[in-house]
Amino acid sequence: MIRPEDLTEEQNMYVIERAIPGAGELSQEQLKGISQTSCGVLNEMGPEIQWIHSYVTSDKIYCVYHAPNEEMVREHAKQGGFPANSVSQVATIIDPSTAE
């Protein structure tokens, strides 16, 4: 797992909260379509921005991205037609190994 502190000075890690009512009920085909749209926009924007993964909940999708700044993350959302209700830069990651 890449931690924010492992990224270059030009890259940051972001968590994006996307409010999408019924997200948890989207079919695999719908999720595939959303993913294809996202990847198409990312390809146009270039290698500076990367989608790492997303968590789909009942009414929201939480996405993890690497990007140089918040503006680039918001531009991806705008070009893809996705909401970006909240964009937060990740300071660090903790997990059970942090307790050791």
Image: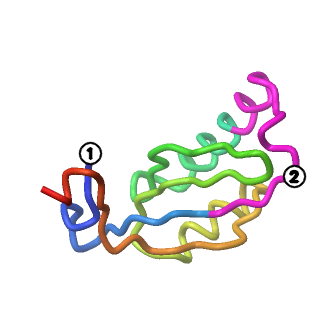
Mark 2 or mark 1, which has the lower sequence index? 1
23 part of magenta stretch: yes
Describe residue 31's horizontal placement relative to residue 94 as left or right: right
What is the quadrant of the C terminus in the image?
bottom left
Describe residue 47's horizontal placement relative to residue 35 as left or right: left
Kind of element beneath mark 1:
loop
Q: Residues within 10 Å of mark 2 (few under 14, many from 20)?
A: few
Kind of element beneath mark 2:
loop
Which residue ends up furthest to the front in the rendered image?
99
Asked whether 23 or 39 is in front, the reply is 23
Identify residue type, mark 1: Met
Where is mark 1, residue-wise? 1
Dot 2 and dot 1 residues touching (CB under 8 Å): no
Which residue ends up furthest to the top in the rendered image?
29
Question: Marks 2 and 1, Cα distance to the nearest angstrom?
Answer: 30 Å
Q: Specify the quadrant of the image occupied by residue 1.
A: top left
Query: Residue 75 at x, y = what percent?
Result: 64, 68
Please state the extent of the stretch shown in magenta in the rendering: 17-34
Asked whether 46 or 35 is in front, the reply is 35
Residue drawn at x 67%, y 34% is 36
Q: Which mark is residue 21?
A: 2
Identify residue type, mark 2: Pro
Query: Residue 67 at x, y = what percent?
Result: 42, 64
Residue drawn at x 77%, y 45% is 58
Query: Residue 4 at x, y = what percent?
Result: 28, 64
Image position of 77 with respect to 37: above or below:
below
